[in-house]
Amino acid sequence: MKNRNRLVIVFTIGLLVSNGYAQNSQPSSKVTAKTADLTLLPKTNGTGGWQTVLANTIKTANQKDLFINASFEVGLFTQTLSSSKNNQSDTSTATANVQVQVLLDGKVVQPGQVVFGRRTQTLTATLEGAIAGCLSLVTNADGSVSIVVDQTCVTPETIELILDSMDASSFSFVAVDVPQGVHTVSVQARIDTTGSAQTGSWSAFGTVGKGTVTVESVRLIKDPNVVLEVD
């Protein structure tokens, strides 16, 4: 009788431990999502490194595939100014670029880096320049009068172009043959701006606004027979 009581007590404790572990572990799920209603990356110029803007975890059962969809507001700002005189051409260029990639447990998910927004703005001007105050009257040998422009006095004329835009972009990433377990999905963004100018100027910025990432656990068809016809 004493041995039976001991067995019952041990079995009851085992159930309690098992139930406690089940409550603390993350259950398997088919879909998970994370959203942000604020600016994830402020207006930035230069070449920056990858920044994690959204991340979430999902537990997969058996060997699954993951559909990962990332959507963001992407802002681009480009400014170019051309300064020219004496009919000399002047060119200024500005480029703003926002890239996004997805990591699964720290490894890049196919198809890799994706451009969510890019703009290259080029402005070229050929101007005579401002000649007010640079004119003088010169009497020629034959008595005629000519108007002469002092080239060193001419000041450049300028033309400036500014574009500022915000658009929403989305792209789907696919991770295949994901093993069973809890996995971390991270979405990263990077801003890259470049430009050049002669006698003018340029500036460029990129920003990432609100965003959403959804992760869906699916089972894809393996080696599908897809026929692609190109005219």
Image: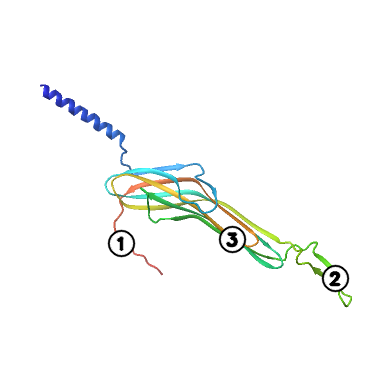
| Residue at far front of view | 152
Q: Calculate the distance from the C-alpha at mark 1 to the C-alpha at mark 3.
A: 48 Å
Mark 3 is on which residue type? Ser
In the drawing, does residue 186 fall left or right of residue 205?
A: left
Asked whether the beta carbons under mark 1 and mark 3 sit within 8 Å of each other, the answer is: no
Mark 1 is on which residue type? Asn
Residue 22, x across and y down, in percent: 28, 35
Q: Is residue 60 above or below residue 196?
A: above
* Disc 3 target residue: 196
Residue 138: numbered disc: 2
Nearer-N-terminus badge (1/3): 3
Which residue lies at the image location 71% right of the left edge and 61% below the top edge?
Answer: 157
Rendering quarter of residue 152: bottom right
Q: Residues within 10 Å of mark 1 (few under 14, many from 20)?
A: few
| Residue at far bottom of view | 142
Which residue lies at the image location 81% right of the left edge and 69% below the top edge?
Answer: 148
One can see residue 90 in this view: yes
In the drawing, does residue 229 fall left or right of residue 141?
A: left
